[in-house]
Amino acid sequence: MKRTMVHVTAAEAVGYRVLVLKVEVRVSRANDIRAAALELFTRLGYEATTMADIGRAVGIRGPSLYKHIASKQDLLAQIMIGTMEDLLAAHRAAIASSDGPVSRLRRATEAHVRYHARHRLEAFVGNREIRSLVEPHRSRVLALRAHYEAGFRAIVDAGVAEGRFKVASARLVSYAVLDLGMGVAAWYREDGELAEDAIVWQYGDFALRLAGASSES
């Protein structure tokens, strides 16, 4: 097959590189703004945080901030939707590498707990500020949460069907497992007594006990 050669002038190459650099700077600045908003929402609360506060945190004055973000509400939505999308991606990866409901519940719980240990601010804001979201953002986050919970519940249901788990309510077990991660976000510290891996493994055991895993599992 004959290949077609594309010739790019030096000026075109420079222009392309400038465009790439501008995009990279824009993405970096957007990430800085989200990080600053996350810290302020955690420390001050969403309602008490102003766009001026966020601007000062990243060294951007007044109207210039709106070149990067439409509103404070959009920032909160980005943080909360991004958190749920990351959790769902971690859940899918965890169960994809697992065989059977016992292994899937352990791996999914470990991914859940590890995320909350590493993203404590996101967990805090996500839990407290759902009240501050307006439509359509609120409905989208609630739908993502429901989808995430349903993933854990499906694992428990499968374990019950296979005789590996014994529970009164799969939904209550899934809620309890989700609470495990949110609890870790409240107290875990990197320099604390327990290492992250040890906590993650122990919480995997807790989830299996909540699901009534048989000793033969």
Image (cartoon, grey):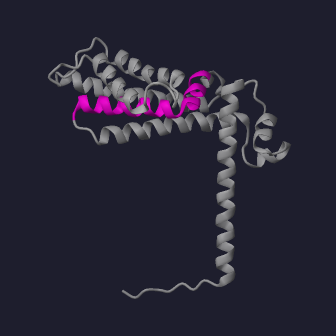
- Residue 105: say if magenta: yes
Position of 175 compared to 50: left or right? left
Residue 197, compared with residue 61, is above or below; it is: above
Position of 64 compared to 217: left or right? right
- In this rendered view, identify the residue nearer to me: 170 or 195: 195
Specify start and end residues of the magenta stretch as a single range.
Answer: 100-128
Res. 164 image quadrant: top left
Residue 112: x %, y % from top left: 42, 31
Instruction: Find the residue positioned furthest to the left.
Output: 216
Tell me the quarter of the image containing the N terminus: bottom left
Q: Residue at x 57, y 86 (%)?
A: 7
Residue 46 visible, this angle: no
Tell me the quarter of the image containing the C terminus: top left
Q: Residue at x 49, y 30 (%)?
A: 116
Residue 139: x %, y % from top left: 56, 29
Residue 103: x %, y % from top left: 25, 32
Examine the residues drawn in magenta and state their main secondary structure.
helix
- In this rendered view, identify the residue nearer to me: 82 or 161: 82
